[in-house]
Structure formats: structure tokens, C-alpha cells
Amino acid sequence: MRPEGCGRQRVILVTGGGGLIGGALVARLRSEGREVWAPCRSKRNSAGFDLDQPDDGTFPEPIQTAFLCAWRGGVVEAAQDEEVTWRTNVEGNLALIKRLREQNVKMVFLSTSLVFAGGETSAHSPLSPCCRYAEQKAVVESALDPHRDVIVRITKVGETLLPRLRQWAVSLRAGGSIAAARGLRLAPVLLDEAVDGLAGIARDHLPGIYQMSARRDHSYFYLAASLSSVVGGVVADDPDAGKAVFRPIPVSGRLTICSPAGSSSWPTGEDRAQLLVERALS
Ligand SMILES: NC(=O)c1ccc[n+]([C@@H]2O[C@H](COP(=O)([O-])OP(=O)(O)OC[C@H]3O[C@@H](n4cnc5c(N)ncnc54)[C@H](OP(=O)(O)O)[C@@H]3O)[C@@H](O)[C@H]2O)c1
């Protein structure tokens, strides 16, 4: 039986459609007139989808493309609870990939720059995951076929930094001091830019491995110092940051940008650090 709301147009499945990237992607695709199925966990018994029960539930047909955005937790959660996150993220996604492969669905998987610990970050460089989260991503990547599927590695969505930047700004404004790592680097892209690129993939579906990143990276210390230059306060280095989760600490926060051939909607690599600082202060 066809789940409600799915007509004859070929459907785009977005898992994790209630999350940051998945939610913005669903909104964009619908605004472009695409038919999207974005099942949430809570509706698992009717037309929902849960990575912890990946063989349950009915999929609408025909699914044309599936964006695999569902994922439990990030770097910290994977380090703290390896077993549970592995089950959801690796076993759940591998089972889903098998199901979708049987239906000949084109897949798009969202991965991370953290699959590289060193400075060599071109799309086809050998992977060297630097944390449990990235190890999980690497295993799921290996189940995909870059000749049929799409792997999109993203550095960091800049908006995820805003709560931390705002908290730092509050402490700095109060005349306090904060600690931020010189040794941890990041090269964020904005959510809209990431969604532009993914929506382009939904249109063209050129298989391959693609990478979204700013062209240069900054340290967390640099971001904190930029805030401090406006609001005052003192910034110190945090030499131990990341040591509990990264082994080793990644050398680079950026990726060598790699976009689908002919894409005009891929992030250009423009530096967004200052913009994020301004947004945090506005
Ligand atoms: N944000 C970034 O900076 C960034 C950078 C690189 C890569 N990525 C990757 O991009 C993807 C999307 O990231 P995001 O920032 O949008 O993450 P997010 O906001 O945390 O969203 C994750 C989504 O996964 C869903 N989910 C979690 N466990 C699930 C399960 N057992 N079954 C079904 N759905 C489940 C969540 O559903 P609930 O709402 O029900 O919890 C949520 O909708 C992730 O794979 C992430 O690793 C993100």
C-alpha cells in the first residue's frame, strides 16, 4: 500500500528530515515542487522510519533518490556511546542502503571532513578517520558505490556554531575570560549553501564523491579572538580541547572542494567566519 501523500511523481526520500540539514533540504525540495517523503521516527508503524528498526515500515514507490541524513549524535555522542551509535548509524544505515539498493534507488549520503585526520583531503584520498564518529561515517561510505551513488562530505554547517559563539560573547561581555582551542580548526559552510548544493544533486544526480568546505580554515581560538576584539574580555588557548574525542586531532578543518561537474550551486569556499561572528553578536 502506498503511504499517504505520495502520488505518482517519483518521490525523493529524505531520512532525518526533522534535523537541521534534512529539514532545510525538505523545505527547499518542496518549494521547488518536488514530491518528498520525509518519514519521522514517531510514525514508524504507519509511514515512519527508524534506523533502529530499519526493516520495518513501507516505502512509497517509486523512490527516485534517497538522501540519507538521519544520524544519531555527533563526535561526542559516538565517543561516549560507541555501541548504541554504531547500531543506529552503521547497522541502521547499512540495512537501509541494502533495502534501497534492491529497489534501485539512487542514494546520497552525508559524510564528514573528519574522515581525514591529515592534510591530504582530496575526494579520493585514502580515508584516515580521526574519531569514532568519522569511523562510522567511513564504514557507511564504503557500502556506497560512487559510480551510482553520491557521497557528500561537509566540513561543518556554520549555524551549528552560533550557540557556542553567543555563549562566548556573553562571557566576554561580562568581562570574563574564555578558553578556545588554537589546535582545533574549522572551515564552515552556511546551511543555505549546503542545501543549494544538495538540491542541485537532487536535480542532476551525478554520481561521485563531493566535498563542501570553505577554502581556508581557522582555529576556534581565532573565532573567539574575533568576538573579543568587538566585545572585550580575554581569550586563552584551550590546549586539551578535543583530546577526549579525536585520535589524532585532525590537522585541517577544511576539505579540498569537489563539486559535481557543471554545478553552479556548490559552495564557492568563501570564508564565512566573520559573518558568523557578526551573526552571533547581532
Ligand atoms: N551539521 C553539520 O555541521 C554536519 C557536518 C557534516 C556532516 N553532517 C551530517 O549530516 C547529516 C545531517 O546532519 P544534521 O546536522 O542535520 O543532524 P541533526 O540535526 O542531528 O539531524 C539528525 C536527524 O537524524 C534523525 N535520527 C536520529 N536517530 C534516528 C533514528 N534512529 N532513526 C531515524 N532518524 C533518526 C533525527 O531525528 P529526531 O529528530 O527524531 O531525533 C534528526 O532528524 C548527519 O549525518 C550528520 O552527521 C552534519
Image (cartoon, grey):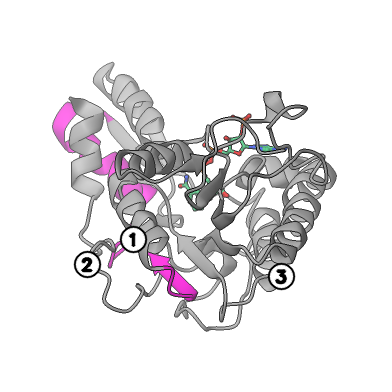
Q: Is residue 124 magenta?
A: no
Circle on res. 200:
1
Q: Position of residue 35 (x, y in %)?
A: 45, 43
Question: Foreground: 266 or 262?
Answer: 262
Mark 1 touches mark 2? (CB < 8 Å) = yes
Of pointers 2 and 3, the one earlier in the residue sequence: 3
Q: Which residue is mark 2?
A: 264
Q: Which of the 4 image quarters holds residue 211? A: bottom left
Q: How many marks?
A: 3
Q: Which of the 4 image quarters holds residue 44? A: top right
Task: Please state the extent of the stretch shown in magenta in the rendering.
Answer: 205-233
Name the kind of residue labelled 1 in the image: Gly
What residue is drawn where x is 48% and y is 42%? 36
Q: Is residue 5 above or below residue 13?
A: above
Q: Position of residue 179 (x, y in %)?
A: 42, 37
Query: Regarding mark 2 in the picture, which secondary structure is present there?
Result: loop
Name the kind of residue labelled 2 in the image: Ser
Q: Which quadrant is home to the N terminus?
A: top right
Q: Position of residue 246 (x, y in %)?
A: 63, 56
What residue is drawn where x is 33% and y is 38%? 235
Give the crowd class for mark 1: few <14, some 14-19, many >=20 residues within 10 Å. Answer: some
Query: Regarding mark 3 in the picture, which secondary structure is present there?
Result: loop
Q: Is residue 126 above or below residue 67?
A: below
Q: Which residue is mark 3?
A: 143
Q: Does 82 sit left or right of 175 as displayed?
A: right
Of pointers 3 and 1, the one earlier in the residue sequence: 3
